[in-house]
Structure formats: C-alpha cells, structure tokens
Image (tube, helix red, strand yellow):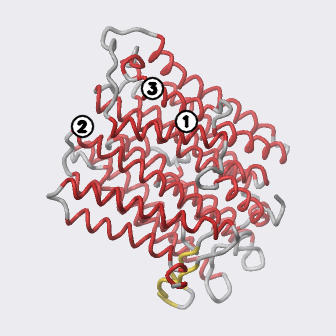
Amino acid sequence: MEWLLEMRPVWVLTVTLLATVAILASGRRPNVREAWTIIASIVQLILVASMIPDVVAGEVFEVRLLTLASGFDLVLRTDPLGMVFACVSSVLWVATGIYTIGYMRSLNEKHQTVFYASFALCIFAAVGLAFSGNPLTFFVFYEILTLATYPLVIHKRTEKAIKIGRMYLAYTLTAGLFLLLAVGWSHLIVPEGGPDFAPGGFLSTSFATPLTLTVLFVLFILGVAVKAGLMPVHAWLPAAMIAPTPVSALLHAVAVVKAGVFGVLRVVGYVFGYDTVSEIGMALPLAAVAAFTIIAASVVALTADNLKRRLAYSTVGQLSYVVLGAALLTTAATTGAVMHIANHAFMKITLFFCAGAIYAHLHVEKISDMKGIGRAMPVTMGAFAVGAFGLAGIPPLPGFVSKWWLASGAWQTGDWIFIVVLITSSLLNVLYFFPIIFNAFFRKSERFTVYNEAPVAMSGPILAVAVASIVLGLAPDIGPPFWTFANQVTVALNGGAG
C-alpha cells in the first residue's frame, strides 16, 4: 500500500494521460467527452492535494521512470517549487474545464474533441514539468507541452491561424533546441550520476570555467525565455490570441507561460544556484532584460484596443516580475517571484474568462465597444475589476503582495532602479486597466441597457476564480499553501536564510 502512495506523481500523470485517450475515444458523445474532462481534473486535483501535507513536512516523492543511458534518467520528484506549479495547474484545470464547456457550447465551436484532448495533454505536460527531477525530464515535458499546444493555437483552422501556428512552433521549437543543447552540455561536465535539480544548483566553477558557465546560462535562459515571454522573443504570445479564449487562459495563466517562468526559477536556483549566477555576473543582465520587458510590454498594452491583445501584453509584462525576482537573488525577491506564479495565474485567468464571456455572450472584442457593458454583465465586469486591480498591485489583492516582496528584494540589493520599474509598471497597469472598468460601469450605451449576464457555466467559474484571487491576497495559505511553499523555496535557495 505504501508504494502506491509513493507513486502518486506517476498516478497524477497517468490520470491526465488516460483522460486524453478517453476524450479522443468519446468524440461522438459530447456529454461523455466533457465528463471525462471534469472527472480527470477533479481526480488530478485530489491526488496533487494529497501530497501537500507531506511536501510541507519536508518529504520528497521521487520516482525514476526510465534510464536512457548512464546518467540520463527520466525522474519525477516533488519539491515546494514544483508543488506551486502543480497546484496552480490542477486547481485552474477544474475551473477552466467547466468554463470551457460553457464557452464551446455557446459558440458551437468545431473540432471540440481535439480541443479537449489537446488541453488535457497540455495539463499532463505542465504537471510533468512541475514534477521533473532533472533537466532532461524537464526538457521532455517542455517539448510535449509545445507540441500539445499547437492544435489549440490553430483551432480555428483558418489560413491566419495556421500561419500563427507556424510562428508559434518556430519560436518554441527553436527555444527547445537551445534547451536541449544546454541540457546535453550540462550532462557532460557534471560528475557521474547525472545532474538533478537541487537548491543551490549542480553547476559551479569547480566543474567548468566561468566562460563555459556563462555560455551555458545563456543557452538555458534562451531555452525558457520564449515561453516566459521575455522581449524580444515574445511576439508569438500576442499573435496566439487568435485561439479561443480558453486556450488564451491556458497559455497565459495555467500552463505555457508559467512553464517558462517556472523554468527560469529552476535554471537560476536549481541548475546554477544564486552564488554561481552572481559569480559569473549574469544576475544583472537577466534583471535588466526583465525590467525592460515589464515597462515596454505595459506601454504597448496602452495602445491595444482589442481586449485580448491588451491582456496578452499585460501577461508579457507581468511574467517578467517572476524573472526579475529570480534575477535579484535575494530572500524577499525569491518569495515575491514564487508567490507571483500563483497570484498572476488566478488574476489573469479571471481576466481572460471575463474576456471570453464578453465575446461568447455579447460578441464584443474591442475595448472601445465596451461602454456601459457593466450594466449588462455586472458579475463579469465586477470580476474583471478584481483581476485588473490585483495585477495593478492595489492592496489587499495578491498582486500587491507579490510586488511588495519584489520591491523589498530590490531594496535588499540596493538597486533602486528596479523599485522604480515596479512602481512605474503599477502606474501603467492602472492606466491600461482603469479606462476599461470606467467605461463599463460609468459610461452609458444604448446597446447595453438591461441585465444580460453570461450563462452559469461561464459566470460561475469567473466568480470562483475572482473570489480565489481575493482570498490569495487576504489569506494565501487557505487552500494550496502557496505562502508556505514560497517560504520553503526561499529558505532552500538562500542557504537557510528565511
């Protein structure tokens, strides 16, 4: 019986993989197909949640799946950082699954079987990434995520969608080549046994010259930077908004871009370690790229009239908060970076759920057409306000918590410029979010005069994730203990300094 419990990381992945197969087999029975989605998401959440007390207590679940060659093992391992990503993916898959059913039915979308199967496979890859015990396993699931997302990006099967799908693959597969080169090289220079993720890293100047480590660091970061949305390799992300809104939610909140910033934290803290990153002088360049992305993306967001495009550029900027937190190499910044993985996920999925409901129910895509829409859809726009103000850093919402810790981390380093970046970004967030909310509630339109809220299948999940966003700000350890996990990561990566 005990070995069954020890194998829980494998069972989590097995459930999702079996769901993918079951969905494909149920293509002609929509209700059954949708039921598999909901059942699998709930079972996965239960399995992930069952591991939380043990991981909080310091227990590690480790399973070596396959040995490809000497030192080349596929390994699953749980740790606090991985549990943050796994919990986010699992909780939000339940909400997204319910929401997607309402969305797809409202628009009577085609190709739904491939859609649901690909979505499940993406969650499989995301949780595999979360539980990856070494760079090789990370790479395998990273590429599965890339390929599984492609059918979702081209879901509409139009000429434009196919073109954007090619663009998506060009960016992400090229990044995968950089990551593969970095993974292979790192296997060559570490001692026997193969490199496993470990707090403080497994690469240091005792194994290679500073120049070699610098090149390796750049290769690893290039490998994860595309999915992390770092400029200038971000262009695929706004373009991919051609996909249905549940895909946008997957890309921006649940799996894909979270895989990118999660990868940055793994590279900085668990491949190289803070001491080595500082020694080779790569912390400041990475922080500078993140700071530029934060400001530039926010400025571009100001000019976008399409709601999903504005949200896309908001994501590009918000993701770089996590990258900046990793690059600052301080205790407070580490806490802020880890917390923002969860905080951003809940707030951004709230915004995309709202955008999807507005489009599916009222067929509105442009911000300039949203005057008075709050009168028709008060629940949706009220939830939108929660997500928007949270991302802008208005207390007591969770975005404020993330930014406070990131600013504290910048204070610890004495780099005032990054505090200025965070404050400027928050002001820009207000500038591109506030007009949407003001127009929705305080300007009149003959088009929106009566209550006309989205169906419960969409408005229910919207309300749930909005409430969860509020709770994350007020009590971040209700539900998944994100705060506890963040503190554990901080202690591990900073040599016991909490």
| Left or right of residue 10: residue 134 | right
Instruction: Judge by depth and name the residue closer to the eye, 391 or 214.
Output: 391
Circle 2 — which element?
A: helix
Circle 2: residue type: Ser
| Structural crowding at the residue carrying mark 1, measured as other residues with C-alpha within 10 Å and reported as few (<14), some (14–19) or many (≥20) | many
Please give the label number shown on residue 474.
none
Q: Which residue is mark 1?
A: 297
**Which residue is drawn at the image coordinates 32% and 66% (left, top)?**
19
- Residue 8, percent from left and from top: 50, 75
Quarter the C terminus occupies: bottom right
The residues bearing labels 3 and 2 have C-alpha atoms spaced at a distance of: 19 Å
Q: Is residue 158 above or below residue 168?
A: above
Q: Which residue is mark 2?
A: 106
- Residue 34, percent from left and from top: 27, 54
- Residue 116, percent from left and from top: 29, 55
The answer to whether the residue labelled 1 contacts the one labelled 3, judged by CB atoms less than 8 Å apart, is no
Circle 3 — which element?
A: helix
Instruction: Judge by depth and name the residue closer to the eye, 2 or 73.
Output: 2
Q: Is residue 143 above or below residue 109?
A: below
Circle 1: residue type: Ala
Instruction: Judge by depth and name the residue closer to the eye, 65 or 197.
Output: 65
Which circle's residue, 1 or 3, is located before the other in the chain? Answer: 1
Which circle's residue, 1 or 2, is located before the other in the chain? Answer: 2
| Left or right of residue 59: residue 15 | left
Circle 3: residue type: Met
Circle 1 — which element?
A: helix
Q: Is residue 215 above or below residue 192?
A: above
**Which residue is drawn at the image coordinates 64% and 75% (left, top)?**
60
Q: Is residue 483 above or below residue 417?
A: below
Quadrant in the picture for residue 362: top left
Nearer the viewer's eye, disc 1 or disc 2?
A: 2
Q: Which residue is mark 3?
A: 381
